[in-house]
Image (spheres, rainbow, N blue to C red):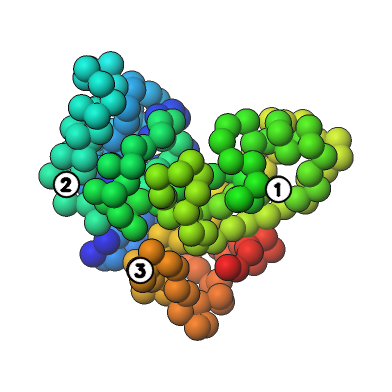
Amino acid sequence: MMRLAILISGRGSNMLRLANVVATGADQTQIVLVAANKPCQGLDSAAGAGLPTQLVDRHDFADKSGQEDALAEAIEAAGADWILLAGYMAILSASFVDRFRDRIINIHPSLLPDLKGLDTHARALSAGYRRHGATVHLVTPALDDGPILLQAALTVSRDETESELAARVLALEHALYPFVILALAAGDLRIIDGNPHWRPGARSIELADTTISDVLKKTVIWP
């Protein structure tokens, strides 16, 4: 059983998508905690879905270190094996990342290493990018860095708006993130000494959730 803690700061759309997929494979994965660093819609949605939740508000602590210690203790108390960042809008300290080394995963709305940081869709359009997408990667102390686990890409239309591009990339995220987690749970993806190793034959994307399969067959970029 792969026990997951999901960290959020906003509406939690990736968290809810993960929860829906996990629910179909409950014999392999379990969400043991959804935690947020501020009151947010996603935390309410998680509670409404029957998931265990906890608010570890940065404003309740004297400093960032105190908040991260409390967050780490909540994750450990829940017995989580993996930490999934799903719109967690805070940069984790090196000490927190080291505490959970090779056990923190993030999804970022760009094809890393391009467009690290915020406002990726606006920056992609401004720079005239013809290719954009999403990346699932292991978290290291450096911002939006770490070994890439899997990516999905799309072609940017010349006349689309930032909101339209953001919506299309979010659809990629909603397929890509669950697929990576399912692959980890099934043993198709393993993390060895901080590096991803995909099982030979794992590139056949045939899942019960056809939304994931149909999206990734057209967009996935294998490492």
Q: Quadrant of the N terminus?
A: bottom left
Q: Position of residue 148 (x, y in %)?
A: 52, 59
Q: Mark 2 and mark 1: span between their CA atoms?
A: 36 Å
N-term mark: 2 or 1: 2
Q: Position of residue 156 (x, y in %)?
A: 78, 45
Q: Secondary structure at mark 1?
A: strand
Q: Is residue 88 left or right of residue 107?
A: left
The residue that label 3 is drawn on is 193
Q: Is 53 located above or below residue 178 in the figure?
A: above
N-term mark: 3 or 1: 1
Q: What is the crowding at mark 1: few (fewer than 14 residues within 10 Å), some, or many (at least 20)? A: many
The picture quadrant where one finds residue 36 is top left
Nearest the eye: 2 or 211: 2
Residue 159 in view, yes or no = yes
Q: Please name the residue shown 56% across and 76% down the image.
A: 204
Q: Do the numbered discs 2 and 1 sit on residues whose CB atoms are within 8 Å? A: no
The residue that label 1 is drawn on is 132
Q: Is residue 210 left or right of residue 106?
A: right
Q: Position of residue 71 (x, y in %)?
A: 23, 35
Q: Please name the residue shown 50% across and 83% down the image.
A: 200
Q: Secondary structure at mark 3?
A: loop
- The kind of residue on which mark 1 rests is His
- The kind of residue on which mark 2 rests is Glu
N-term mark: 2 or 3: 2
Q: Do the numbered discs 3 and 1 sit on residues whose CB atoms are within 8 Å? A: no
Q: Which mark identifies residue 111?
A: none
Q: Nearer the viewer, mark 2 or mark 3?
A: 3
The residue that label 2 is drawn on is 76
Residue 49 in view, yes or no = no
Q: Mark 3 and mark 1: span between their CA atoms?
A: 29 Å
For this orientation, the residue located farthest to the right is 158
